Amino acid sequence: MANICQEDWTYFKGYCYSKVSSCDSWSSSQGTCATLGANLPSIHSQEENVYVQSLHGGEHTWLGLSDINTEGTFVWSDETPFDFHYWANHKPNKFHKEDCVHTLGFLQDHKYEWNDVNCTNCHRFSCKKDYNECTDFSNDCPVDATCVNSDGSYSCRCPVGYLLDGNNCTGLYAFSYHLLE
């Protein structure tokens, strides 16, 4: 697939990612991403975990995960559900105010695992933002439907009184007649 994200961003499964090569603290990195309309990456599958870590060639990089607000309760900076994790053995370990999470990469046999570290450490990072499928022709909504963007995806909505029937918006009367046949 051709890159559908803006320049210096790459597309992966509904999101655009930008690799930032400078080294910074977790909060400064998140601030940089925020100025770009993005967040430090949230990870929701092993496939995404591998992709994000590959952006930096397997080096340590920040993730958008922290327990800054409540010790032991990790949340993503983009407020998406914490539905996937890939901690290294004996992590997180709550050692010396280690409230932010970075990747261990795949160098030195770390296998894409995560580690909690001090938020003032300096790591490279990537930024992640939703790709709006409704702004171009990448969605397959019918002409008479409205494209509604959602985080990492989109949906098609037909006008009131119509239902989405395959690739068409069909009037409820016609739809019920079709069911009776």
Image (cartoon, rainbow, N blue to C red):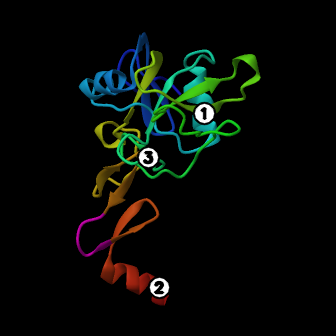
In magenta segment, residue 62: no
Residue 164: give x, y in percent of width and height: 39, 67
Q: Which of pointers 2 and 3 lies earlier in the amino acid sequence?
A: 3
Disc 2 and disc 1 in contact, CB within 8 angstroms: no
Q: Please provide the residue range marked out in magenta.
A: 158-162
Secondary structure beneath disc 3?
loop
Mark number displayed over residue 179? 2
Q: Which residue is mark 3?
A: 71
Task: Count neighbours of disc 2 (C-alpha within 10 A) and say few if under 14, some if 14 to 19, many if 20 or more.
Answer: few
The residues tagged by marks 2 and 1 sit, at their Cα atoms, a distance apart of: 52 Å
Q: Which residue is mark 1?
A: 114
Residue 75: give x, y in percent of width and height: 42, 46
Going by the numbered disc 3, the residue's amino acid type is Glu
The residues tagged by marks 3 and 1 sit, at their Cα atoms, a distance apart of: 17 Å
Residue 151: give x, y in percent of width and height: 38, 47
The residues tagged by marks 2 and 3 sit, at their Cα atoms, a distance apart of: 55 Å
